[in-house]
Image: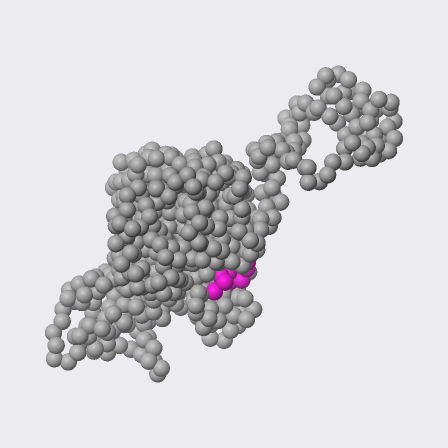
Amino acid sequence: MTQPKIIFCSQFATEKVLNTSKKFPFIENVIQYGGTALVDGIYAFDNILKDKKYAKPEKEFVGPSQDLNRTAEILLSSGTTGLAKGVEITEWNLLATMNIYKSFTTLGEFIYFHLSKNQDKNGMIDGITGRKTSYSEIKEKALSLAEFLRQIGIKEGDVIGICSENRIEFTITMYSAFFVGAAIVGMNYLYKEGELIHTFQMTQPKIIFCSQFATEKVLNTSKKFPFIENVIQYGGTALVDGIYAFDNILKDKKYAKPEKEFVCPSKDLNRTAVILLSSGTTGLAKGVEVTERNLMASLGIFNEFWKALYNGRELTSINCTPWFQTLGFHSQIICLVENFTLIFLPRFEERPFLNCIQKYKVTHPVIVPSMALFLAKSPLVMEYDLSSLEELHCGGAPLSKELEDNVISRIPNLQGIRQGYGLSETTMTVLISYDIKSKSGSVGTVTKGTYCKVVNSETGKNLGPNEIGELYFKGPQIMKGYIGNDAATKETIDSEGWLRTGDLGYYDDDKYFFIVDRIKEVIKFRACQVPPAELEALLLAHPKIADAGVTGIPNEADGEHPMAFVVKKLNVEVTEQEIKDYIEDIVTDIKKLRGGVKFVNQIPKNATGKILRREL
């Protein structure tokens, strides 16, 4: 069965191994452990080690060729139907089991390893054009772009901005940044000038990559900030003279250095890898600093999860959630590490989404609740063959039991919806449904290596099962902090390293968690975050508005819609539509007042002037 070429054995087995081996010509040598062989003509192990001709200098050691699919071990597994079977364990199986994440010194090295391991696979497919990109091509282009970044002066610790829809260049840029030890900040390509100004001031990117939809406003806004040295447009032709075109950089031979000359950044796992924009209730977005250690720890947790569930199966995912946000950003790296094929779309559109599932036989899509609602109710779903779907992975907000059941009932072969819970501040998921048949409405159980407690936010007392309180988390994936905002960091992470989520929830007797409400007042629209305070500040700038408060109202399709409560100035007339139009002209689409405007006599506030949103 195994056809060994050489056999090592102890003295207790030498004679029978030697006699049996004579029946098999492929067995060329038998070596006995110890200093004296029991039989003439075979090697003694200790004598081999003493022989100077085998003592070559360590620096001359040459490892085998790179092939992590090579069999490393054959385990003999007895079954119930007869003799033992030989279980082949690959080098990758063995390394994953040993938690190889601990052996990497930088995120760049980690990404390079996985791109090399999966290099022959078509890792990403553009769902619109059908273009397939192998991990080998992604690696080659990311290395060239990294060399370009080095030559124009990008150093470890610098920040690189990406203002774009989902596209293959986004992924290439992200990996090139990791190769040079720079941090990535993703920005909504629909941002208005004020939102770009805030993001630039906070994160101070040295270079910004953008798609054609954002080039003009990014370039105009960047002129206000001398620390922004370059703007690079994705594609082959820049819309504006004097800026780089992405494709031309990759074609330039001076950046195409041999792969063997690739040099990882210096070892510093506390270096910021990504800045995720997370809106709160106190104003504009905060920048969540996620370190290389945070990211690799989270990926290690995910690897344990995927390994236990899918055992190395080749799966196909589709993702059209924005890559400039937490869920979409991390999905790219997870698919690389877990060897998924990732189908991507620039944004969610109903027919392209369904067509890609049918065409590429998607098995495990990443969705948000608004997409689940579409699958549950749209008549379009019945026009497509979705029988390849095995599981839906849903994040952004909890799904109700009714919505879960409706989706499952409409899609043949769908085993269930796997929910999870996480924040930008926790890097990725900290609660996840390990069992696809877990309790409806639950966001799962605590991930390995993570600590969680439920706390009474008024008394600070730790709560037990079925008691509602604020969720706290602690672990290696908890963010470094909010960039340039020590006060907010201290408010969120206590002296013992516990992160306050601002979310209310509980766990049941089986330690399944359920999210009930939010202490934080951020409005969640289609998994995007809308800060009420930002909208309130804009409303108060209107000449006909005396006071205003904003809150979210539930919406089955989108999660929540921003709704404004407005106190008019005396002796003026202003309509709901006038206020909605005013806000629409100055904010991104997600921040429109879809919940409407209601005129009131006063805004309820506490003694310190804080708006009591629950009374709105």
The magenta span reads 471-481
**Quarter assignment of residue 88:** top right
From the viewer's side, name the closer residue of 589 and 249: 249
Point 48% across, 58% down: residue: 157
Point 73% across, 25% down: residue: 6
Left or right of 253, for residue 15: right
The total number of labels drawn is 0
* Res 598 seen here: yes
Left or right of 455, for residue 545: left
**The stretch drawn in magenta includes residue 126:** no
> Residue furthest toward the front?
254
Quadrant of the drawing holding the C terminus: bottom left
> Residue furthest toward the bottom?
607
Point 54% across, 66% down: residue: 497
Point 49% across, 56% down: residue: 156
Is 84 rendered above or below residue 275? Answer: above
**Quarter assignment of residue 287:** bottom left
The percent position of residue 216, horizontal first and vertical second, equals: 25, 54
The percent position of residue 362, horizontal first and vertical second, equals: 39, 37
Q: How is the image coloured?
A: one colour
**The stretch drawn in magenta includes residue 477:** yes
Is 363 rendered above or below residue 588? Answer: above
Is 2 rendered above or below residue 211? Answer: above
* Res 416 seen here: no
Left or right of 496, for residue 127: left
From the viewer's side, name the closer residue of 159 and 551: 159
Left or right of 19, for residue 291: left
The percent position of residue 366, horizontal first and vertical second, equals: 39, 46
